[in-house]
Image: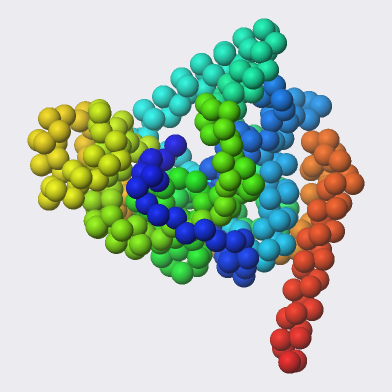
Amino acid sequence: MGVAFGSLINKKEISLDFLRERKVGVDSYNIIYQFLSSIRGPDGTPLMDSKGNVTSHLTGLLYRTSNWLEKGIKPVFVFDGPPIVLKSKTLEDRIRVRTDAKEKHEKALKEGNMEDAKKYGSRALHVTKDMVDDAKFLIKALGLPVIQAPHDGEAQISFMVDNEDLYGAISQDYDVLLYGGKRLLRNIATSGKKKLPGRNVYVDVAPEIIEETEVEKQLGINREKLIWLGILIGTDFNQKFPKIGPKTALKLVKSNNSFEDIIKETKFEPDFDYNEIVNIFMNPASTCDYRINFSVPDNEKVKKFLCDKHDFSEQRVDSVLEKIKAINSEKTAQTRLDMWG
């Protein structure tokens, strides 16, 4: 998912306190995938209720969102719309990968190989419409904004950041920068240590901010060439150029003034229209029809949904709701002090 040029750019570590009182756009599909991948049992199976409905993403949303609110962060959840036609090939490839991983996960479970089961279980990710509907219901019940993008959520968030309605985009994907997003906020939904894919190695993870202007300055290229760089190493809309990694791709875009010249130098004729991809990123589909409204949670609705429908612990849900209530009470008291101070 997304372009892989993270190794080329510097990241600036921040604390969650840095985002206090800032409205930030959440790439909701991206964060749901994160929760589905990380919140799983020892055998790689996601959390489920008694009826077999997956609840890993709901667990992540409940606890992570309450932590953000405690830090004074104002999350605005933006959801993908129907995919652009050009993205269909990428989606088909992902389905094949998931299907293969699901078969290997089931085989590992039968053989009692818990290490492989956990590895392949986290790769067999599939976000269903029911999962998305449940996520939207919970977010709204918590009193937080939900915005529907025409197509890619990152594109919509980038538009809202440019419109100064949001500060930045919470996502793991660097696509935000290709869409012209001014600020990418990574590792905001994760904390502590992260396991490297395919390796039994854990690394420290810290929140970080990446600013588009700083990336362009560091790499010595403009936004259009940043998009060329993405096309060379692969985007959601095209396969990468063969035998070209991020460093080689950067050299190519810096030494050529047109993508046609890059094609000539690489001697690789792509089977896609690169101009169409450039246009998708340079002129992303977005909508002005959105409202950013925050309200207090509907506790009864949250509890009925999580506890009655999805078997969550009533005590734990009450604890989260009490924390959010205390946060809102503190904000109300501070507002009154500010008015009369």
Q: Residue at x 57, y 32 (%)?
A: 201
Q: Position of residue 311 (x, y in %)?
A: 83, 35
Q: Is residue 177 above or below residue 86?
A: below
Q: Residue at coordinates 71% horizontally, 56% vertically from top-left? A: 67
On the question of residue 53 being in view, the answer is no
| Relative horizontal placement of residue 72, taking residue 173 as reference (left or right) | right
Give the side of residue 128 with respect to residue 158, left or right: right
Q: How many marks?
A: 0
Residue positioned 27% across, 42% down in the render: 247
The residue at the far top in this view is 111
Residue 15, quarter of picture:
bottom right
Pick the front one: 44 or 159: 44
Question: Residue 233 appears at what percent x and percent y?
Answer: 30, 37
Q: Position of residue 338 (x, y in %)?
A: 71, 86
- Colour option used: rainbow
- In which quadrant will I find the N terminus? top left
Where the C terminus falls, by quadrant? Answer: bottom right
What is the x, y in percent for residue 318?
Answer: 86, 51
**Measured along the vertical axis of the image, is residue 259 above or below residue 165?**
above
Q: In the image, 138: left or right of 125? A: right
Q: Quadrant of residue 173?
A: top left
Q: Residue at x 61, y 33 (%)?
A: 37
Q: Is residue 118 visible?
A: yes
Viewer-proximal residue among 298 and 155 = 155
As drawn, which residue projects farthest toward the bottom? 341
